[in-house]
Image (cartoon, rainbow, N blue to C red):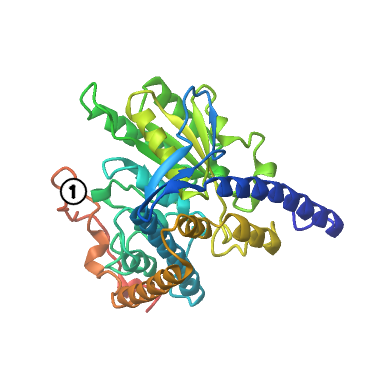
């Protein structure tokens, strides 16, 4: 792509800007439509008209949602913490305190926060390697997430997982998968387990597998979806469409870019993934549908990532800064939620500035806390590989595990 004639390259950028401008304009109308319809200082109703598109469904999410001030403030605090945490990851990576792969989530915070608000801890969640913020929502802390990225023993998975492999059994969070699309068959297995363990006639816990638009055309996804439909599993196939598969736009990498329709006869729904109210209400609808034995559903979240694919990708060779700036100014999920709260009379600009300032301080304190830890001890290298009691916490050290031989090490 970089070898294309400069004039043609500029034409392609211009075309991309035009497409994005139309998308941003449409989304701006949607965000404006999510206005406060009625309410008081603690609770209000909001209009979501235009936030959903459905496929093979006779019903749809409600176009009116009610939320309290405390709910929206909690969502904002979590989303702003996610944003500041990811910006901190960027800085720590550039300072070489974080090594290896690192995929940041800033811009997509409303997706993880809205899904988390709609699901319960009994529901199973598995996602891609862009997983820091989901880990935070599913029982994590900023210090545990950063500690894991630093490779320290007090990290989210004791320094053994790194950026792409978070896990929290207590919250039914299964990662963090390093291989593109590999989480989807595993997620389908989680849905199978949820159905298997639920007494007939009762609502089932659902399972959700989140993956990007770049993975959406993989064969393993359709194979999994086929089984899920045959067995009516409570499975949600959630495509986080951030407009690029690595560095390739959806127009260039997918012949079918209406991802919520990719399940053929499996129903689907597209949501405004930059609108926390739409994501929560939409996912509440999807969870209810799947939990009642109707089978799986495809969900497409229309969202955007501000960083490149990973920290090794500047994100400006296949898109320009104007595109990113335009999205920030018209669709940013944090600014949308802040404006929604102010328009509803829940808060004012001065209070929100204080909230943001307090969170910035909290994140910095968590960074200091994370750095007080240290790498795992050598003895921990072989723990939690084999279990002697069928998957419980205790583990068994096998005598055939070969430990490092420092006498032969190139370090010496």
Query: Percent from the top left, x then y, of residue 166?
Result: 35, 55
**Which picture quadrant has residue 376?**
bottom left
Residue at horizontal 67 percent and vertical 62 percent from the top: 316
Q: Nearer the viewer, residue 339 or 273?
A: 339
**Which picture quadrant has residue 188?**
top left
For the image, the number of numbered tags is: 1
Query: Percent from the top left, x then y, of residue 142?
Result: 35, 66
Q: Using residue 269 as the reference point, say whether residue 19 is left or right of it.
A: right
Q: Quadrant of the C terminus?
A: bottom left
Q: Using residue 356 as the reference point, say whether residue 4 is left or right of it.
A: right
Query: Percent from the top left, x then y, of residue 286?
Result: 41, 33
Disc 1 packing (10 Å; few <14; some 14–19; many ≥20): some
> What residue did someone put label 1 on?
387
Tell me: residue 140, above or below residue 245: below
Residue at horizontal 46 percent and vertical 52 percent from the top: 110
Query: Percent from the top left, x then y, of residue 234?
Result: 35, 30
Residue at horizontal 86 percent and vertical 57 percent from the top: 7
Residue at horizontal 54 percent and vertical 42 percent from the top: 215
Q: Quadrant of the N terminus?
A: bottom right
Q: Using residue 207 as the reference point, say whether residue 154 is left or right of it.
A: left
Tell me: residue 182, above or below residue 322: above
Viewer can see residue 258: yes
Q: Using residue 396 as the reference point, say whether residue 237 is left or right of it.
A: right
Name the element at disc 1: loop
**Which picture quadrant has residue 199?**
top left
Tell me: residue 192, above or below residue 11: above
Viewer can see residue 103: no
């Amino acid at each position: 792509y970089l070898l294309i004639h400069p004039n043609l390259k500029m034409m392609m950028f211009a075309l991309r800007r035009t497409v994005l401008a139309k998308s941003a304009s449409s989304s701006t109308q949607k965000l404006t439509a999510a206005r406060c319809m009625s309410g008081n200082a603690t609770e209000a109703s909001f209009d979501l008209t235009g936030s959903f598109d459905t496929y093979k469904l006779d019903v749809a999410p409600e176009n009116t949602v009610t939320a309290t001030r405390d709910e929206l403030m909690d969502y904002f605090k979590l989303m702003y913490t996610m944003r500041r945490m990811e910006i901190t990851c960027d800085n720590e990576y550039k300072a070489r305190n974080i090594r290896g792969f690192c995929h940041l989530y800033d811009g997509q915070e409303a997706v993880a926060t809205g899904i988390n608000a709609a699901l319960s801890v009994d529901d199973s969640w598995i996602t891609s390697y862009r997983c820091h913020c989901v880990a935070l929502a599913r029982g994590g802390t900023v210090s545990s997430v950063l500690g894991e990225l630093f490779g320290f023993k007090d990290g989210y998975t004791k320094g053994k997982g790194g950026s792409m492999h978070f896990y929290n059994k207590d919250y039914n969070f299964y990662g963090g998968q390093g291989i593109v699309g590999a989480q989807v068959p595993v997620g389908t297995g989680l849905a199978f387990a949820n159905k298997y363990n639920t007494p007939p006639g009762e609502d089932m816990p659902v399972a959700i597998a989140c993956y990007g638009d770049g993975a959406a055309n993989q064969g393993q996804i359709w194979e999994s979806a086929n089984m899920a439909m045959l067995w009516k599993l409570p499975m949600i196939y959630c495509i986080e469409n951030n407009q690029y598969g690595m560095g390739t736009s959806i127009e260039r990498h997918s012949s079918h870019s209406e991802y919520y329709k990719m399940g053929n006869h499996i129903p689907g729904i597209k949501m405004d993934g930059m609108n926390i109210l739409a994501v929560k209400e939409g996912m509440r609808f999807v969870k209810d549908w799947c939990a009642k034995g109707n089978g799986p559903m495809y969900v497409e979240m229309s969202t955007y990532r501000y960083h490149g694919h990973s920290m090794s990708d500047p994100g400006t060779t296949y898109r320009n800064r104007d595109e990113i700036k335009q999205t920030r100014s018209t669709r940013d999920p944090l600014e949308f939620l802040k404006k929604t709260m102010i328009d509803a009379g829940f808060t004012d600009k001065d209070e929100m500035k204080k909230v943001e300032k307090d969170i910035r301080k909290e994140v910095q304190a968590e960074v200091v806390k994370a750095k007080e830890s240290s790498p795992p001890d050598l003895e921990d290298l072989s723990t939690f590989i084999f279990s002697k009691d069928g998957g419980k916490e205790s583990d068994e050290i096998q005598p055939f595990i070969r430990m490092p031989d420092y006498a032969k090490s190139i370090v010496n």
